[in-house]
Image: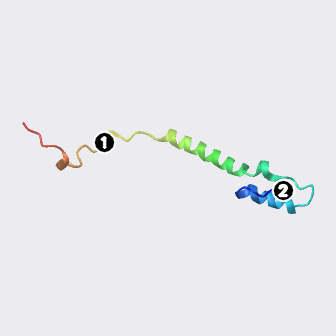
Amino acid sequence: MSTSGTGALAFLRKENIVAPAGTVDPTSTLYNTTMYAMAGLLVLAFIANLLVKPVREKHHVENTHPELEPARTS
């Protein structure tokens, strides 16, 4: 059996060599928890995005650096 590959799959290949006969291969469920966590974060981000509102006009600042504006000629 080849042990080429990286990460968890290479580890599982090595472990299956040592594991007793009849051991269930966990490869199909290896990332389930991670995918559920990612889906939960995606839903949370979507809800947070819906709750964002525009900044009120009274909080807008018009002229923070007057020295940078070109001189007006009258």
Q: Is residue 59 above or below residue 15?
A: above
- For label 1, count other residues whose C-alpha is less than 10 Å away and answer few (under 14), some (14-19) or many (20+): few
> Is label 1 in contact with label 2 (beta carbons under 8 Å)?
no
Which of the labelled discs sits on residue 20, or is there none? none
Task: Provide residue 34's location: percent of width, then percent of height.
Answer: 68, 51
Q: Amino acid at mark 2?
A: Met
- For label 2, count other residues whose C-alpha is less than 10 Å away and answer few (under 14), some (14-19) or many (20+): few
Q: Amino acid at mark 1?
A: Lys
Tell me which numbered mark, 1 or 2, is placed earlier along the sequence. 2
Tell whether 50 sits left or right of 3: left
Check disc 2 and report its element: helix, strand or loop. loop
Task: Provide residue 51's location: percent of width, then percent of height.
Answer: 50, 41
Tell whether 65 sits left or right of 31: left
Q: How many numbered badges does the structure rendering display?
A: 2
Quadrant where the image shows the C terminus = top left
- The residue located at (19%, 48%) in the rendering is 68
Question: Foreground residue, 59 or 11?
Answer: 11
Q: Nearer the viewer, mark 1 or mark 2?
A: 2
- The residue located at (70%, 57%) in the rendering is 6
Q: Which residue is mark 2?
A: 1
Question: Foreground residue, 43 or 53?
Answer: 43
Quadrant where the image shows the N terminus = bottom right
- The residue located at (58%, 45%) in the rendering is 44
Task: Provide residue 22's location: percent of width, then percent of height.
Answer: 92, 55
Check disc 1 and report its element: helix, strand or loop. helix
Which of the labelled discs sits on residue 58, or is there none? 1
Q: CA distance from mark 1 to mark 2?
A: 69 Å
- Residue extending furthest top? 74
Q: How is the image coloured?
A: rainbow
**In which quarter of the view is residue 71 placed?**
top left
